[in-house]
């Protein structure tokens, strides 16, 4: 009986140790529901905080050969950490308001102005377009250290803050009579697709996101990406622990959020020769996402051919937004 009691006690200790064991991170698999719910809290914010919107300028832009008449509105609002977030909103001058709106999430080193790369085509279709400077980018970069480096907590926090900023941007759109805040989606490119996966996962107001050249598992991407910034980091830090990178970045990794977009549809377009957000990371994102999803591979690298990509994006938005 005494032996049996010792064995039972040992089993109890073993069971408890397994129960409290921290979740595995960096294994290419999404975290469990309990861990996700802990991560999800990072994206909550006090909605009673005033937006304090400032319109810097509202410029009517006449029609040209490639762009319809529209308004280009430069603005800023306060985020949840008392920082002013600059953005641009393009709204059609023709058609009937309220207009559906597409967020454009730029890539690494980009800025809100690159939303014009998509706004011309989207304005023709009757969509408004909005873009923000991501944390540590554009007007939010001067006087700050770069987001990318070996300070992975800064990288993680920059991703999280940008996602919250876009949630605040939706709050702003809900105050505008010319925008249909029930029809809001996003187009994210590269880093923007990484952030967009998370944004779509935590905010159900995003309807049918488009993720261009996105991927999952930050540790994997850091290990094999051929983008210059990561090549430099690896060369200068030969003992870098990429599993630790995955652990730090897990609360902002698309791997743990993209499945929460379902049952809303998601479109993912990637290049078969991408070495910046590499193909293995693309496939992890595709696998983690749930139905309904549409996955398109183009014979390209990290820069997708516009002539092939834009018709796919526009058709997606026409039929789903």
Image (spheres, helix red, strand yellow):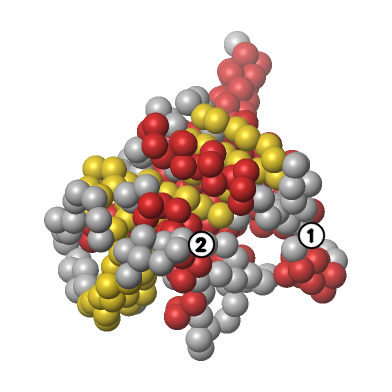
**Distance between the alpha carbons at the discs numbered 2 and 1:** 25 Å
Quadrant in which residue 86 is drawn: bottom left
Quadrant in which residue 189 is drawn: bottom right
Q: Is residue 258 above or below residue 154?
A: above
Mark 2 = which residue? Answer: 117
Q: Going from the N terminus, do you reach mark 2 or mark 1 first?
A: 2
Give the residue at x 29% y 47%: 100
Q: Position of residue 148 (x, y in %)?
A: 63, 70
Q: Is residue 235 above or below residue 185?
A: below
Q: Position of residue 135 (x, y in %)?
A: 47, 70
Q: Is residue 199 visible?
A: no
Give the residue at x 28% y 43%: 183
The label number, if any, that marks residue 179 in the structure image: none
Q: Position of residue 127 (x, y in %)?
A: 33, 51
Q: Is residue 53 visible?
A: yes
Give the residue at x 37% y 47%: 125
Q: Residues within 10 Å of mark 1 (few under 14, many from 20)?
A: some
Quadrant in which residue 23 is drawn: top right
């Amino acid at each position: 009986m005494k032996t049996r009691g010792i064995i039972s006690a040992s089993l109890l200790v073993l069971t408890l140790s397994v129960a409290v064991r921290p979740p595995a991170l960096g294994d290419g698999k999404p975290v469990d529901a309990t861990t996700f719910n802990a991560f999800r809290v990072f994206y909550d914010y006090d909605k009673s905080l005033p937006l304090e919107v400032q319109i810097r300028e509202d410029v009517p832009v006449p029609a040209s050969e490639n762009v319809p008449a529209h308004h280009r509105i430069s603005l800023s609002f306060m985020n949840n950490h008392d920082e002013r977030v600059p953005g641009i909103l393009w709204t059609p001058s023709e058609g009937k308001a309220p207009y559906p709106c597409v967020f454009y999430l730029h890539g690494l080193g980009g800025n809100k102005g690159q939303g014009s790369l998509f706004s011309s085509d989207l304005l023709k279709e009757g969509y408004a377009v909005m873009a923000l400077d991501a944390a540590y980018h554009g007007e939010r970069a001067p006087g700050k250290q770069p987001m990318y480096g070996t300070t992975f907590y800064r990288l993680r926090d920059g991703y999280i803050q940008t996602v919250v900023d876009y949630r605040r941007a939706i709050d702003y759109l809900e105050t505008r009579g010319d925008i249909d805040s029930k029809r809001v989606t996003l187009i994210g490119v590269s880093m923007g697709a990484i952030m967009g996966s998370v944004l779509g996962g935590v905010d159900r107001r995003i309807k049918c996101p488009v993720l261009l050249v996105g991927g999952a598992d930050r540790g994997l991407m850091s290990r094999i990406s051929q983008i210059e910034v990561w090549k430099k980091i690896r060369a200068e830090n030969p003992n870098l622990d990429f599993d630790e990178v995955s652990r730090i970045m897990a609360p902002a990794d698309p791997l743990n959020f993209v499945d929460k977009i379902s049952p809303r549809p998601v479109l993912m377009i990637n290049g078969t020769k991408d070495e910046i957000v590499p193909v293995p990371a693309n496939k992890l994102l595709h696998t983690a996402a749930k139905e309904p999803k549409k996955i398109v591979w183009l014979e390209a690298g990290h820069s997708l051919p516009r002539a092939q990509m834009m018709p796919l994006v526009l058709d997606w938005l026409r039929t789903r937004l």
